Amino acid sequence: MDDRRIIVLISANSEWRAVKEILAPPQVESAPLGESFAVRSFDILRTTPLTYFHGGWGKISAAATTQYVIDRFRPDLLVNLGTCGGFEGRIARGMVILVTNTIVYDIIEQMSDPEDAIAHYSTEIDLSWLPDPLPHPVQRGLLVSADRDILAADIPELVEKYGAIAADWESGAIAWVAKRNGVRCLILRGVTDLVSADGGEAYGNIELFHENTKMVMKRLIEHLPDWLKE
């Protein structure tokens, strides 16, 4: 029996619906900040108890629920599985990103140095504990976060300034809070749709996002035990 305490945070509502559909938990608990349920992940070596928790969409919910689960569960590892939008030409649809750094880019500071404000909420994630080679093909990379979908006009600057390949709403907050608490963090995000100068594939087509979210979350859940073996 593995006695590690592992929390799996799921952010967007569509991601959480997909997770519940895939895992079909017999019982779902309610908490002030979201639903949760416990499952066991079976592999050859052991049985690892996992608690899935709905972290909610956006930086506010992500930060609040990250601190909540850290205080309540005292996890040895915090995992965030989810989706992201990719920059066309920088990454392929369906690719899984192993997030190495996060940047919150929707900060506008006009009274002092704006770069200091961006740096304050930027996080480098310690992944030195992961096995080599990694258990599944992924693209290591930086993920930028904001409380908005990707604006096509922002892509050139995000690529030039940060080398960004994709964006989401929550990873920046989750990584920042986890690091401040000294909690090991693993973020895996799958690209559901691409955004280019012509707009986004899922913009005005939410069903495309929902369908691709189901595929991404199924893949991430199936692969998760392999990431937890070490």
Image (tube, rainbow, N blue to C red):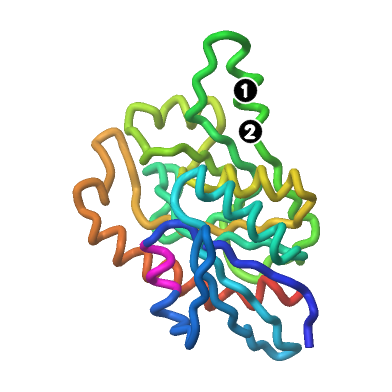
- Which disc is residue 121 wearing? 2
Q: Position of residue 137 (x, y in %)?
A: 58, 65
Q: Is residue 114 left or right of residue 6?
A: left
Where are the magenta residues, as a range?
A: 14-19
Report if residue 17 lies within the magenta region: yes
Residue at the front extreme, as displayed: 32
Q: Quadrant of residue 206?
A: bottom left
Q: Quadrant of residue 216?
A: bottom left
Query: Which quadrant would the C terminus be assigned to in this image?
Result: bottom right
Name the foreground residue: 204 vs 78.
78
| Mark-to-mark CA distance, 1 and 2 | 7 Å
Name the foreground residue: 228 vs 162.
228
Name the main secondary structure of what is drawn in magenta. helix
Query: Which quadrant would the N terminus be assigned to in this image?
Result: bottom right
**How many other residues sit within 10 Å of disc 2, few (<14), some (14-19) or many (≥20)?**
some
- Helix, strand or loop status at disc 2: loop
Q: Is residue 142 left or right of residue 23?
A: right
* Residue at 70% over, 58% down: 70
Q: Kindly identify the amino acid type of the residue bearing the numbered disc 1.
A: Ala
* Residue at 68% over, 66% down: 134
- Which disc is residue 117 wearing? 1
Residue 27 visible, this angle? yes
In the picture shown, does residue 136 fall above or below 222?
A: above
Name the foreground residue: 9 vs 191.
9
Q: Position of residue 153 (x, y in %)?
A: 33, 27
